[in-house]
Image (cartoon, rainbow, N blue to C red):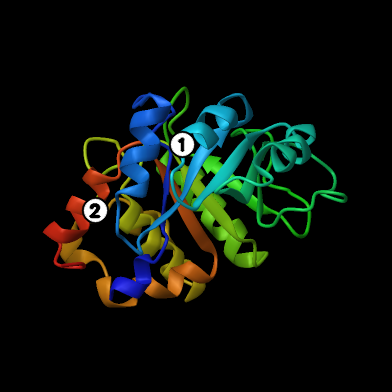
């Protein structure tokens, strides 16, 4: 079951609401011995500070504009830090010339879901706008129908949906439901005992990762469900 969550959680500790200082975020990230954690998410302005703190190989996901990515590659050259992926704000028409993959293109809710053919769609589930169940379900259906890889960020600390907040396990189960031709909307609000937890791994064909500023809470949620040790 652990493979269902392999590198699912991108470490966004330096972003709100966590706002961890660079030294704290880098030390904590390097101290995690977990196959469930993806790269450390970092905006271009903090890349030099991350390089200064990195005492061993460290993969980062660079966040910024399209034109930020290439300068980031120059900054990390010769350091223990490598750019594992990039996240840029959409809409953009193409990713030609970007020497990094994967590239996630963040689309604000209401601006459509179209991204370049070789991009990962990025959507927010918290912050200024929390998508409704119907909005999130429609996005999941879009991704399944178009075979569109996607990642989510913000607002997904809890494993199971509660009090209006989305749950990432519900999202995984909803993706599987949509893949099977079922309506994902009811799954997004279902209790844990109503979810097909054994099939969550199937969602990872499209659901690439979830950004979170607090890794401990989602991992604790998985342990509480008995899905990881």
Label 2, on which residue?
A: 219
How many marks overall?
A: 2
Regarding residue 161, the answer to whether it shows in the image is no
Regarding residue 39, the answer to whether it shows in the image is yes
Q: Which image quarter holds the C terminus?
A: bottom left
Q: How far from the left and from the top, in percent, is residue 75?
A: 69, 36
Q: How far from the left and from the top, in percent, is residue 66?
A: 77, 36
Q: Is residue 165 above or below residue 184?
A: above
Q: Secondary structure at mark 2?
A: helix
Q: Is residue 69 left or right of residue 223?
A: right
Sequence-wise, the earlier of marks 2 and 1 is 1
Q: Is residue 146 left or right of residue 22?
A: right
Name the one closer to the observer, 131 or 64. Answer: 64
Q: Is residue 53 above or below residue 59?
A: above
Residue drawn where x is 74% and y is 49% of the image: 115
Judge the density around disc 1: few (<14), some (14-19), many (≥20) Cα neighbours within 10 Å.
many
Q: Which image quarter holds the N terminus?
A: bottom left
Judge the density around disc 2: few (<14), some (14-19), many (≥20) Cα neighbours within 10 Å.
many
Q: Quadrant of residue 163?
A: top left
Name the one closer to the observer, 138 or 50. Answer: 50
Between the C-alphas of marks 2 and 1, the distance is 23 Å
Q: Is residue 178 left or right of residue 156?
A: right
Q: Nearer the viewer, mark 2 or mark 1?
A: 2
Q: Secondary structure at mark 1?
A: loop
User: Is label 2 in contact with label 1 (beta carbons under 8 Å)?
Assistant: no
Q: Is residue 199 above or below residue 167?
A: below
Residue drawn where x is 32% and y is 56% of the image: 170
Q: Which mark is residue 131?
A: 1
Q: How far from the left and from the top, in percent, is residue 18?
A: 34, 27
Name the one closer to the observer, 128 or 6. Answer: 6
Residue drawn where x is 50% and y is 61% of the image: 207
């Amino acid at each position: 079951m652990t493979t269902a969550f392999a590198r699912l959680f991108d470490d966004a500790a330096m972003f709100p609401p966590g706002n961890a200082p660079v030294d704290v975020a880098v030390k904590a990230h390097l101290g995690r011995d977990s196959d469930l954690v993806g790269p450390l998410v970092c905006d271009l302005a903090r890349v030099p500070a991350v390089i200064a703190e990195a005492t061993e190989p460290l993969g980062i996901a660079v966040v910024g504009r399209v034109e930020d990515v290439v300068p980031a590659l120059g900054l990390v050259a010769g350091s223990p830090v490598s750019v594992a992926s990039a996240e840029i704000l959409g809409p953009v028409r193409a990713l030609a010339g970007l020497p990094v993959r994967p590239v996630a293109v963040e689309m604000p809710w209401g601006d459509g879901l179209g991204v370049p053919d070789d991009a990962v769609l990025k959507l927010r589930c918290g912050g200024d706008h929390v998508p409704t169940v119907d909005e999130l379900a429609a996005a999941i259906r879009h991704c399944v129908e178009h075979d569109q890889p996607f990642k989510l960020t913000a607002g997904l600390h809890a494993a199971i949906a509660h009090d209006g907040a989305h749950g990432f396990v519900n999202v995984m189960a909803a993706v599987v439901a949509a893949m099977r031709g079922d309506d994902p909307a009811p799954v997004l609000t279902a209790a844990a005992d109503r979810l097909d937890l054994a099939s969550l791994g199937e969602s990872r064909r499209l659901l690439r990762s979830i950004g979170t500023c607090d890794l401990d809470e989602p991992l604790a949620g998985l342990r509480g469900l008995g899905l990881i040790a």
